[in-house]
Image (tube, grey):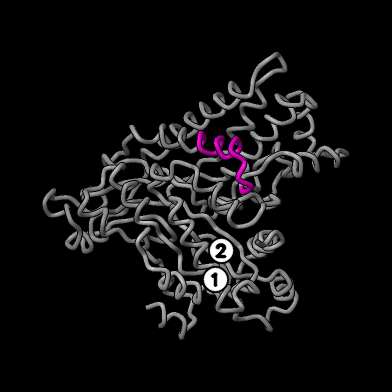
Amino acid sequence: MLQACLELKLIDPKLNLRVDANTPPSCFEKATELTREGLGFPQYLNDDVLIPALLRWGYAPEDAYRYAVAACWEPIIPGCGTDVVNADGLNFPNAVLSVLNRTDDSPGSYPKFLTAVCGQVRADARAICERLTDLYVFPAPMASFMMDGCIENARDAAQGCKYNNTGIHGVGISTAADSLAAVRTFVYGSGELTLSALRSALQNDFRDLPLLQNRLRCDAPKMGCDDDETDAAATALLDAFADALEPLRNAQGGCFRAGTGTAMYYLWFGRAVPATPDGRNAGDPLPANDSPSLFARVKGPVSVIKSFTKQHLVRVANGGPLTLELHNSVFRSADSIEKVAALVRLFILRGGHQLQLNAVNRDDLLAAQKSPDAYRNLIVRVWGWSGYFVELDKAFQDQIIQRAELVI
């Protein structure tokens, strides 16, 4: 299959590769050859994390072991369910801003602030689930004949499958964690800022405050740099998200599954999110999936992998992809293929959930915007799918170019 994809160089069907700690290095190396072609796949799925995650969320062992991927990265069980995997998204940065906007300057502490943000995440998650109680799934009588549970329950697939779960994406977790790191550093750490001063700067979108914005962007810790305290904040946020969803059930009796894939919400939510304490401007995109922010100065791919494998990813059953942009020159030699393959294997061994690699070149992307006819075959990984760059909406093109500016 990998060889066929290498020879055909088509964006569909996109390839998802299930791997685990025992997958031989030769498999990772062949898959890396495919990444070198710039197709944006394969996406790596770690069975050592995904299968326990599905079991935790109520899937039977015989089903969990034969999972497949739905549209982008969301696990499903073929022939067993009508899981709605992309029902809504939880906005992590908004939870931070909500707490910031209602907290005064009286003496407090960072742990109390973080606890309040986690409480807001739980409240927001529960509100989303309440909003989805009336979610309507269209009947599918013909498909119902082929789905487990429908005949046994004498119900259509929309109501009577073995699994009728709802997926909620967690959006902007690194922006939220980086924002918490900025609050920890400059408000509760050095005391250089008060919460009210930070609020004022955000409300004015850092107007006339370029030095402050630059300090928030560059001098506060960021996810992707293997900073334990910042990564711990991301873990706390994800745990709060999962805590809120795990006891809840939808109208069909299914569970609500937490995930950290963003789908299109990283642009949609980003347009409406005000300026954030990490130095991001109002309206700017959020990071795609479970990935570093668009201006994080990371210390290399190993530090990114270490940061993004500290979260309790077994609690993520709706997909948790880390997306990494690598410069396409990285793949030029056989030796470099082995090194990238070893990097992927490191991600798996450290308990990573899912991994997507983009082989990109910023100069090519900019040239493609100016002369699209000359770059008709330029392919990029967008969020959970690959597409021809020149056919994307400009907002998505610009976000991918931003990602490529800090290519590893």
Residue at point 51%, 33% (across, down): 236
- Amino acid type, callout 1: Gly
44 in the magenta segment: no
Please identify the dominant SS of the magenta region.
Answer: helix
208 sits left or right of 78 in the view: right
Q: Nearer the viewer, residue 137 or 306?
A: 306
Mark 1 and mark 2 in contact (Cβ < 8 Å)?
yes
Q: Which quadrant of the view contains residue 134?
A: top left
In percent of width and height, residue 106 lies at: 70, 13
In magenta, the rendered stretch is 224-237
Q: Quadrant of residue 401?
A: bottom right
Residue under label 1, please give it.
387
Q: Marks 2/1: CA distance?
A: 7 Å
The residue at which mark 2 appears reads as 382
Estimate how packed mark 2 is, as few (under 14), some (14 to 19) or many (20 or more) residues with alpha carbons within 10 Å. many
Query: Please, what is the three-letter code of the amino acid marked with disc 2?
Result: Val
Q: Nearer the viewer, residue 168 or 277?
A: 277
Residue 358 in sight here: yes
Q: Quick check: 43 above or below 287?
A: below
Q: Position of residue 213 (x, y in %)?
A: 80, 40
